[in-house]
Amino acid sequence: MSRLPITKTPKVYVGGAFIRSESSRVFPLPDARGDFFANIPQCTRKDLRNAVEAAAKAGPGWAKRTAYNRGQILYRLGEMLEARAAEMTAALIRFGAPKARAAREVGLTVDRLIYYAGWADKYEQVLGSVNPVAAPYFNFTVTEPMGVVGVIAPDTLPLLGLVSMVAPAIVSGNTVVALASERHPYPAILLGEMLATSDLPGGVVNLLTGFRKELVPTFATHTHLRAISAAVTASERKTIELGAAESVKRTHFVDAEKTDWFGDRAQSLYEIRDFLELKTTWHPVGA
Amino acid sequence: MVCDLMKAGQSASLRKLFDEIGPVDCVGIEERVAKYATRSIKKVAKVWGLKTAVSMLDLTTLEGKDTPGKVASLCRKALRPSDDPAVPSVAAVCVYPSMVRHAKKHVAGTSVKVASVATAFPSGQAPLKTRLAEVRAAVADGADEIDMVINRGAFLEGEFGEVQDEISAVVEACGAAALKVILEVSELETYDNIRAASFLAMEVIRAGDFIKTSTGKTSLNATLGNNQVMIEAIRDFYLDTGVAIGMKPAGGIRTAKQSLQFLIAIKETLGDAWLTNKRYRFGASSLLNDLLRQLEKEKTGAYQAPYYFSEATESY
């Protein structure tokens, strides 16, 4: 007996909910063979604004959780992806990734999550310090999350690239608004479904899909974004740097072509440090 | 708000009142106000609306922890909300009676008025003599406007004469000060009751006085729905008598977007004559910050972080 196939409407994951663009706009996404696959939300700068509000609302609660708990949740996200690895791999292949590379990309994405999960309750010991001073004080430096971080993900390796940029930002208590790869947005939509089942509080990671041309200028100028982590072209980089200077935000650029995303050097403690503020306090030595 | 049809249980006095003023079409109101949220106000009109909303604000602090210092900083913000001179002063600062003299020092001689809640705000549960004395004291200290609460107990008992007599007594105690009559809509329970209370108040106050939704101290505050019931009452009363009464929604209006929707309701129900702070006010404390934030966004084109516009919120 034949039946009508039920196709999925891809929606973006913002504030813990799956939503369409406020504009109701979509763009058609063909698969690697050129067949129509689905209509993807074409998010607007208003969607970006709403996502930043959601991220800011989720932020204080996320940052207050214990480091150990944040690590557990990131680990749980790895578990969710591992369990649905076949589905994710199939999605990557459908959009043109060679079979072996797709499987490797998904596997390594899980490993990357586990890597940063491990750092959750350890980076503070490495990046913080007790400083020698010439007065009767304990002087120590501790780290604090910055706030809402914008991520603009690369087109190469749409899953691994995105996760490699999001995970080090959120592990310390930041929240993220990320723009998925414009060319291959579907893995990010699938990732959203895994985020939703991973104990990660809604709003900590918000994933948008849409056109860079429309969204990069708003990422650059939005004053509520404290930092931006971007895999972008030279002209986009200029836009971001100008906007970031105006809105006083930290920039972190990734060269998507030159980065060996599969290599060990694509993951590092310093990726976590780039989205931290360092706070130094002087405490009188008690009698 | 419950859509409550005329019930057999209604008191005779209420039924008699509705024979005169007519009941509220509850579903019609809800449908009407749902449309206000769909209007698209952009660019020049939006900036005009935001600035008008600023000029209509009763910037309010009604807390047990209010101090003269806190009121002073509120007054400075009321006079000059933004470093942009194109942004107007707000209409008034709204404080407790004990703070009136402190506020008056800072805004005397300017366009900013001092409004004071009085009459045992927010419950109104004090002897009439005490409530009137409070009003006189606030006026003597320099209050330009008095926000009173009606006797909800008497209203719900059907003692409309008592409700009106008390309002009349407060009108008299106000002297030259304008009066705003708080109906406390959340305790009136139905749209019909809100309309009835609006008329009872309007019949005894003066042109230029206001009716006001709520104290902001209960769970349900100003909504587009109860605002609509009240401004339609104002419209009907104006068409009947020629007396123009003002309106002040208060409590729960926190975003610029909401305030624009209220302005749309005014424009489409009462017309341009009410789009002035002489006839329409917003009672709010945090709304101003969001209005300034949206004005800055319109000016610079960049979305603004809320922590640049408020005194004490977390800065995540």
Image (cartoon, rainbow, N blue to C red):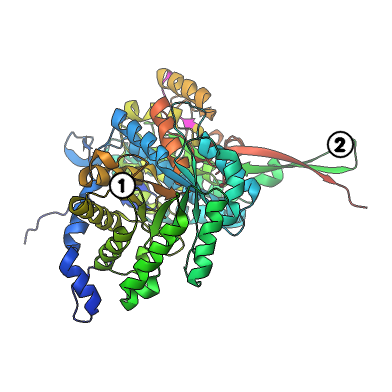
- Quarter containing the C terminus of chain B: top right
Residue interval drawn in magenta: A229-234
The kind of secondary structure element at disc 2 is loop
Residue position marked by numbered label 1 in the rendering: B262
Classify 10 Å Cα crowding around label 1: few (below 14), some (14-19), many (20 and above).
Answer: many
Look at the picture and state if B198 lies above or below B78: below
Q: Residue B207: percent from the left, percent from the top?
A: 32, 49
Please say whether residue A185 is visible from this viewpoint: yes
Chain containing mark 2: A
Number of marks: 2
Q: Residue at x 24, y 79 (%)?
A: B11
- Quarter containing the N terminus of chain B: bottom left
Q: Residue furthest bottom?
A: B9
Q: Amino acid at mark 1?
A: Phe
What's the mark number on residue B62?
none
Q: Residue furthest right?
A: A287
Q: Residue at x 33, y 25 (%)?
A: A213
Choose between A90 and B148: the one closer to the eye.
Answer: B148
Look at the picture and state if A195 lies above or below B127: above
Residue position marked by numbered label 2 in the rendering: A133
* Cα distance between the residues tagged 2 and 1: 59 Å
